[in-house]
Amino acid sequence: SYSTILSAHLDRVVSAIESRLSQISVQSDRLGGPRGDDVRWQGVLEAARSGANTVVSLSVIDSEGVIRQSTLAPIVGASRRDGAIYQSLSASTSPEILSEPPFASEFHDGMIMPFARRLVSNGRVVGAVVAAFSAESLREFYGSIDTEGGQIRLLHESGVSLLEEPRIIGERISDDPILESYNAGRTSGVFVGPLSDGGPIMITSYASVRHTGLIIATSLSEEQALTAWRQEVLVGGLI
């Protein structure tokens, strides 16, 4: 299904972000930690962000939750102590890659979701390097997929919708069965029903993306979905 294919694509996007975070983290000691030389840090962060179309900024926070380095100059010096990443830094049960729920950025279009990796020196956590993933960076790609009146959505387990392509017009149904199903422990599923009150019947499938809390949902008209199914059955019968 589209949702399975797109979740695999998003998994690769997240993996690329994680790889960049790892490459930066191993240079932290050489750069003097989060409070190291600004010019040297800036060179490393800018080089890591180069070519990463899905990352709008890279930042470094110290052990107090203060942003000490960033490719986005206006946020240097700001505190992130209230964020889930800072609060998880010293927790032994936290995963290697940390994240926070998406939020609307005042500096970029659309929703931003931070991913981070701890910075460790001599066995002690001294901060984290943080990548701001931009959901909006995927709009053109999702828009190129022909859903014939359907829609592609990127959701977060917190209930936040990061991206809808195309944007839905009208009042969305209040109870989202995708989130209900996901929160019940099902990492994928299929539903039949309208996307908005009074809208046409759609066949919606969803698939989650590993540990990220991200969920891809694709909605197709009944006719298109059944046409694709008939084609699969026909091809299967010929093999």
Image (tube, helix red, strand yellow):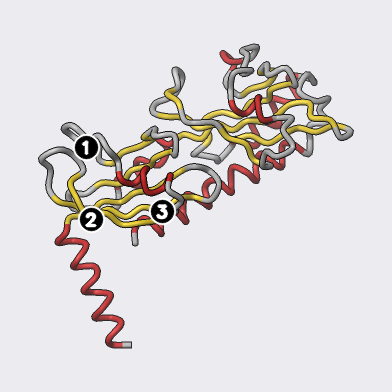
Q: In the rendered structure, which amino acid carries the disc numbered 3?
A: Ala
Distance in Å between CA atoms under marks 2 and 3? 14 Å
Based on the displayed image, in which of its 4 quarters is residue 234 positioned?
bottom left
Marks 2 and 1, the one that precedes in the sequence: 1
In the rendered image, the vertical position of residue 188 relative to residue 16, given as above or below? below
Q: Residue at x 18, y 68 (%)?
A: 227
Label 3 sits on residue: 207
Q: Which quadrant holds residue 195?
A: top left
The one nearer the camera, 132 or 185, is: 185
Q: Observer-nearest residue: 193 or 109? A: 193
Give, as a three-letter code, the residue at label 1: Ile
Mark 1, Cα crowd under 10 Å, few <14 / some 14-19 / many 20+, is some
Residue found at the very far front of the displayed protein: 184
Q: Position of residue 140 (x, y in %)?
A: 34, 42
Relative to 138, is 45 above or below? above
For disc 1, the marked residue is 173
Give the distance between the C-alpha atoms of the residues marked 3 and 1, in whole angstroms.
20 Å
Percent position of residue 131, x then y: 59, 33
Nearest the viewer among 10 and 158 is: 158
- Residue 203's label in the rendered image is 2
First of labels 3, 1 by sequence position: 1
Viewed as shown, does residue 95 lie left or right of 55? right
Tell whether 106 sits left or right of 129: left
